[in-house]
Amino acid sequence: MAKTANNTDTEKKIYRVKKNLDPNMIVTIKNGFQGRLVYQSKKTGETFIWEEFGDEQDMELSEAKAARNSSKKFFINNWFLIDDPEVIEYLGVEQYYKHALNSENFDEIFNKTAKEIKEIISQLSTGQKRSLAYRAKQLIEDGTVDSIKVIKALEDGLGVELILR
């Protein structure tokens, strides 16, 4: 067996420089929880309250960073929805938002095929799965979602029963 010379060309790694954002800038944090969400700052003692899914609260970026350090579950479960990719990167929480649904496209999943629904659900955080199950129940109850295929895909993907049989 003949030996071949290794390719000496080295691949250059590309490093992205994090944006240097002002810690005092105001960012909008949306409620990603289907219901009332309360966050109390360990830094300032201030209480932030979102009454329902999609509600917005303005918060200093430094406060969001403090929340990441003290209450990471708000990010892991996608209870805090952040639409600005630069803020997500600055906070170092990209891994939690890679496949997250945001407040604007949350209901779009109900218009997908059964296969697409299962694929999307498989990539969601536990918190988003719970929110999706809650939202699905609402939309099934009011008749917005009535496709048996969609409901079955949601039940299979989420591991919950959405309609009583």
Image: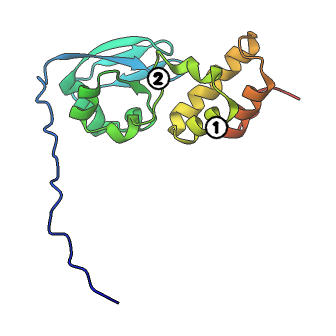
Q: Dividing the picture into quarters, in which one does residue 155 lie?
A: top right
The residue at the point 39 percent across, 26 percent down is: 80
| Percent position of residue 68, x then y | 29, 35
The residue at the point 76 percent across, 10 percent down is: 143
Neighbour class for label 2 at 10 Å: few (<14), some, many (≥20)? many
Q: Please identify the quadrant where the C terminus is shown.
A: top right
Q: Nearer the viewer, mark 1 or mark 2?
A: 1
| Percent position of residue 153, x then y | 71, 34
Neighbour class for label 1 at 10 Å: few (<14), some, many (≥20)? many
Extreme residue in the right direction: 165
Q: In the figure, is residue 66 to the left or right of 53?
A: left
Quick one: 153 or 77, which is closer to the camera?
Answer: 153
In the displayed structure, 62 sits above or below 47; it is: below
Amino acid type assigned to the residue bearing label 2 in the image: Gly
| Percent position of residue 34, x then y | 55, 21
Q: Earlier in the sequence, mark 1 or mark 2?
A: 2
Q: Please identify the quadrant where the N terminus is shown.
A: bottom left
Q: Could you say whether the residue bearing mark 2 is in a helix, strand or loop?
A: loop
Real-space Cα separation, disc 1 to disc 2, in angstroms = 20 Å
Q: Dividing the picture into quarters, in which one does residue 21 lie?
A: top left
The residue at the point 34 percent across, 36 percent down is: 71
| Percent position of residue 112, x then y | 63, 25
Quick one: 72 or 81, which is closer to the camera?
Answer: 81
Give the labeled residue for mark 1: 118
Q: Dividing the picture into quarters, in which one does residue 4 lie?
A: bottom left
Give the labeled residue for mark 2: 32
Quick one: 80 or 151, which is closer to the camera?
Answer: 151
